[in-house]
Image (cartoon, rainbow, N blue to C red):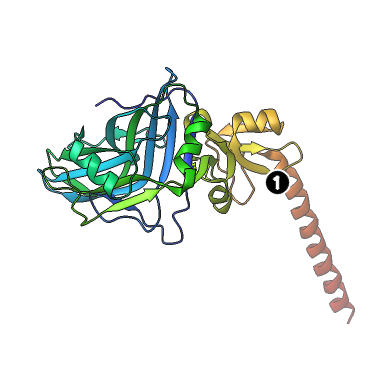
Amino acid sequence: MTGCKYAGALIVVAILIGSLQQKADACGDPPPQPPKVFLIDQLDGMTFCVVFVDYKTFGSPSGTPCTCAMTNTASITAITAVDFIDASTGDGTPGSGMAIPGFSFVENATSSSSWAGLGVPSATGFLAVTTMAIGADIDLEIKYTVTAPGASLAGLKAELVAGGANVIGTDEAAPSGVPMGTHQGIFPSGGFAGACCLPEGICDGGLTETECRQKGGNFQGEFVPCSQSPCGSCCLPGGGCVPTSEDFCTTRKGGGFTAGEPCITGVSAVCPNMVPAVSAWGGAVAIVLLLIAATVAIRGRRLKAV
């Protein structure tokens, strides 16, 4: 099954998962809130990937039917493939990991009509029967390859959130492709996100600006992927360290960048202007020792005089 390659700009559609930090299960339990969504534009200008993030596998034996569906928006003329991606094998950007063995989805007319009836408008449904046992708790991303001639990233983004309509459904299925309803999840999409440089010097590619700030990170902008925004520490000209990308650091802040270097509590070992130099510390310690020695000497003389 062919998935989208990494080329061109990205956009992310995301929503906060909330304080529960729960994740959805493909062919398993639905999440408490809609999953995050990531859009990738390919070089040919008409093929996009829509990656739904924050799912988990619940574990299933070989021969388990699973169904999923995505809506066709005004610009999407076809949904041609589905891949189940192991997020842990990627680079932090949604959709960049390897496909999970055992799933082979094909378009299924029964699934399509069933999902449309369940509230996923203009749905294209897919059915897979697992060809091997699937382990539990794999961090899962569901990647749809879609054709949208003449579409723009901004246009697709607007279509996916229009009216709060549902855009995805997942469930276990009957052999015919009908969703069973036992672990069903039907969701709309939410807000938008991009790359976040975290204080540890690493990038998280699926956070909103609010989420990024809550984690103490530096947001690189909507639609920016981790692959285009390697993170590290930025030593600012006036002192201080911020976690950010090299371009943001050098071009917009005029700072010095070190890839992969963390900024912990605003201090970085690679920023010499952020902490007193060794000689300064040494001088301060020497002064303190001299004051202590002088105090001791004065007290000793007073004792002798008595």
Q: Position of residue 57 (x, y in %)?
A: 25, 48
Left or right of 173? Residue 262 is right
- Screen quadrant of the N terminus: top left
**Residue at far bottom of view:** 306
Left or right of 237? Residue 123 is left
Q: Position of residue 89 (x, y in %)?
A: 33, 36
Give the mark count: 1
Q: Can residue 92 be spotted in the picture?
A: no
Q: Position of residue 122 (x, y in %)?
A: 33, 39
The crowding category of the residue bearing disc 1, from other C-alpha atoms within 10 Å (few below 14, some 14 to 19, many at least 20), is some
Q: Which amino acid does label 1 sit on?
A: Val
Which quarter of the picture shows residue 44? top left
Q: Position of residue 153 (x, y in %)?
A: 50, 30
Q: What element carries label 1?
A: loop
**Residue at far right of view:** 305
Left or right of 224? Residue 28 is left
The residue positioned 86% from the left and 70% from the top of the image is 298
- Screen quadrant of the C terminus: bottom right
Q: Can residue 70 be spotted in the picture?
A: yes
Left or right of 50? Residue 180 is left
Nearest the camera: 48 or 264?
48
Give the labeled residue for mark 1: 275
The residue positioned 23% from the left and 37% from the top of the image is 126
